[in-house]
Amino acid sequence: MNIFRILSSNDGSINEPNVSSFLAYLLNPNEDHGLSSLLLQEILNEFLTIKSDYLNKLQFNGRITDLSNYSGYSINVLPELAVNILHENKKKRRDIDIVLEITDSNDNEILYAICIENKITDSSIIKNDSQLEDELDGLNNYYSENKLKPEIFVIYLTHTPSDISTASFDKLDYERKYHLYWDNHDNSVFNKLIKIFNNENQALIDPINNQTVYLIKSFLSFIKTNFKSYIEERQEKLEKKNYGKPVIDHLIDFANSLSFDESFSINSMKKRFSDYVKKKSGIKLHNATRNAHISLSIVNERNRGHYSVKRADDKRKNIFYYTDKSKKTVKRFRIGINEKIQIFYKKDGEIEFIYTNE
């Protein structure tokens, strides 16, 4: 039994913000998880590999020192911190997933602010987006308005190494930054948690309580399954067995063969997609499966929220849009080209939408 995969099943109550919240919990030495500041130290040590004098006020013998309650430092965790930037003479808001403030307990001076932007899938990364730049500008504004001057460090946490995540990271022109991964990399959150468990087994650190061990091992398994629920994984395995790969991947490939300028009737779209899958897999696509995937791929289709579309920026599922209110024709969707189109998704059990120009 894995509590994370169970809770993410059905309506999918575990999403990117939920994963960020659990990470913030593990990084906070003041919480009851029993890890103290071990995970936080492991992550911050990565900055020292970039430049040895980074975070120098926290160093002891060339490593990040203990940051637990009695260390002389205090950690303030700010989840979903809203910051503002001025964009084209308009105030624009960005929500930073996690901000960790590290304060000197003697004089309450905030020494460092660690900005963490979390992406559990590449589909939530928008190509050429200015998110990291905006968050850095917004965080600088946030501290300037409060007359504070901590050194700001940026951690970009993405699922695994990929071209789109690397391009997004490299686009940020800033020295004090680090690209961290959830998995499939030497310096990943997965490996850092495994290292902590190995150190406990060798009696190099204090014992971790059994409840925390179970919880974190469940989380590690959740990472390994790409943050998928039992239902999602079973569905993808079934689709891969039947059609060679998940139907959504077939739909993405099919859409990439279409022009952005051409309109398609829904009925012709369904037939063409069925023919495409049959040609690629040799298997006839079930009509209900086909219809569900086409519905979830149309950004201004309100019912797509019932098909596990949990983010407005889910690039993997934002494929088409209705061209008018009749909902009889669609075109390929592309952010930046299609302005002021509603994108529907489901958040906290409710169907919501956001306009593309937002």
Image (tube, rainbow, N blue to C red):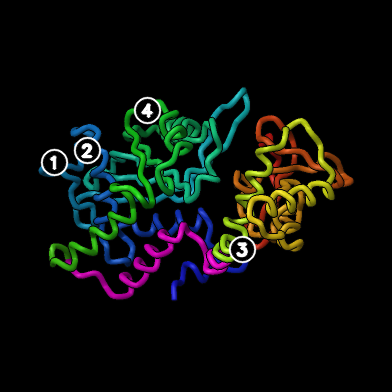
Q: Which element carries disc 3, helix, strand or loop?
A: helix
Mark 4 vs mark 3: give the one in front. Answer: 3
Which amino acid type is shown beneath numbered disc 3? Answer: Asn
> Which residue is farthest left?
61
Q: Residue 174 carries which label?
A: 4
The question of residue 216 being in magenta is answered with yes
Marks 4 and 2, how far apart at CA: 16 Å
**Residue drawn at (84%, 50%) of the image:** 267
Location of residue 169 in the rendering, given as x and y in whole percent from the top left corner: 42, 34
Q: Are marks 2 and 3 in contact (CB under 8 Å)?
A: no
**Residue drawn at (58%, 26%) of the image:** 87
Which amino acid type is shown beneath numbered disc 4? Answer: Tyr
Q: Which element carries disc 2, helix, strand or loop?
A: helix
- Main SS of the magenta segment? helix
The residue to which callout 3 is attached is 242
Which amino acid type is shown beneath numbered disc 1? Answer: Gly
Location of residue 330 in the rendering, given as x and y in whole percent from the top left corner: 80, 42
